[in-house]
């Protein structure tokens, strides 16, 4: 149970930071705050649950072989619940009238999906290499590397897709009207696709790391 509570808390504060910084006027500083939020939550909960806070990362870790299906499914469920809870907290704190009147429009669904694939691939690739690889066991920088990856990808690719790189964030953003529910498939396909590709590449590059 402690692993699931940790995943809920980490995802909650990640999505809370997304909602409050993006909708609260942080502007170009929002990706820095979001990356920092992920970093501190990874450091806080990594020793308990692995600090995924992202269904696509959980899928990548599952394919990599460091989590069981019986744990992966509850992880994803509590991550989504944490994201929804955070979305309602943001709406309460900011006020429904201050939330976006309509979802951010994507100029191109294909470009948005490619952006989500690339960003999630980078995130999952870094997670697998710094937090699960035997060669990097016990390192002290994994949280910083993971948080900085989200920040860099958000600055680089956010203009194309909003920069979720996380299906739970996409669900929370949809509840906050930051993304259209009709576009949720872009994030599901892009994020899970990026996670799967990262796991495949990790296994190819590390065939002896079972």
Image (spheres, rainbow, N blue to C red):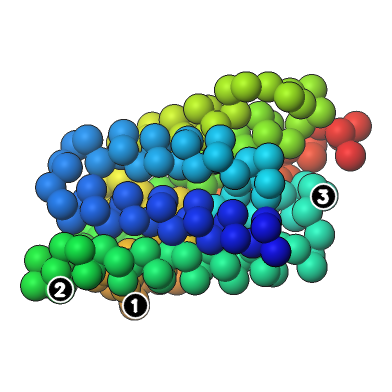
Q: CA distance from mark 3 to mark 1?
A: 33 Å
- 20 above or below 177? above
Q: Which residue is rendered at x = 44% and y = 30% of the image?
A: 148
Is disc 1 in contact with disc 2, using a CB cutoff of under 8 Å?
no
For the residue pair 73 and 114, the one nearer the viewer reads as 73
Is disc 3 in contact with disc 1, using a CB cutoff of under 8 Å?
no
Residue farthest toward the front in the current orientation of the protein: 2
Is disc 2 in contact with disc 3, using a CB cutoff of under 8 Å?
no
Q: Residue 67 location in percent, x, y?
A: 78, 54
Q: Residue 142 location in percent, x, y?
A: 60, 29
Q: Which mark is residue 65?
A: 3
Q: CA distance from mark 1 to mark 2?
A: 21 Å
- Which element type, helix, strand or loop, lies under badge 1? helix
Residue under numbered circle 1: 182
- Which element type, helix, strand or loop, lies under badge 2? helix
- Which element type, helix, strand or loop, lies under badge 3? loop
Q: Which residue is rendered at x = 82% and y = 49% of the image?
A: 65
Q: Is residue 61 left or right of residue 119?
A: right
Residue 59 in view (yes/no): no
Residue farthest toward the bottom in the current orientation of the protein: 182
Q: Residues within 10 Å of mark 1 (few under 14, many from 20)?
A: few
For the residue pair 115 and 41, the one nearer the viewer reads as 41
- Mark in front: 3 vs 1: 3
Identify the mark nearer the N-term, 1 or 2.
Answer: 2
Identify the mark nearer the N-term, 3 or 1.
Answer: 3
Q: Which mark is residue 96?
A: 2
For residue 5, which quarter of the picture? Answer: bottom right
Q: CA distance from mark 2 to mark 3?
A: 42 Å
Q: Which residue is rendered at x = 26% and y = 63% of the image?
A: 90
- 29 above or below 196? above
Q: Is residue 147 left or right of residue 87?
A: right
């Amino acid at each position: 149970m402690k692993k699931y509570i940790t995943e809920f808390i980490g995802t909650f504060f990640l999505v809370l930071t997304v909602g409050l910084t993006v909708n609260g006027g942080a502007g170009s500083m929002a990706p820095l705050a979001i990356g920092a939020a992920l970093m501190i939550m990874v450091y806080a909960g990594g020793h308990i649950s692995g600090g995924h806070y992202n269904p696509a990362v959980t899928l990548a870790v599952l394919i990599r072989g460091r989590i069981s299906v019986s744990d992966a499914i509850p992880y994803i469920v509590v991550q989504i619940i944490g994201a929804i809870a955070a979305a309602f907290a943001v709406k309460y704190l900011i006020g429904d009238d201050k939330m976006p009147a309509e979802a951010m429009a994507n100029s191109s669904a294909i470009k948005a999906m490619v952006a989500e694939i690339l960003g999630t691939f980078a995130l999952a690739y870094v997670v697998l290499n710094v937090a699960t690889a035997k060669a990097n066991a016990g390192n002290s920088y994994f949280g910083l590397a993971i948080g900085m990856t989200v920040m860099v990808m958000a600055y680089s690719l956010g203009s194309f897709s909003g920069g979720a790189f996380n299906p739970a964030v996409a669900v929370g953003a949809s509840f906050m009207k930051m993304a259209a529910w009709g576009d949720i498939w872009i994030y599901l396909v892009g994020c899970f696709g990026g996670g799967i590709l990262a796991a495949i590449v990790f296994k190819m590059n590390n065939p002896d790391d079972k």
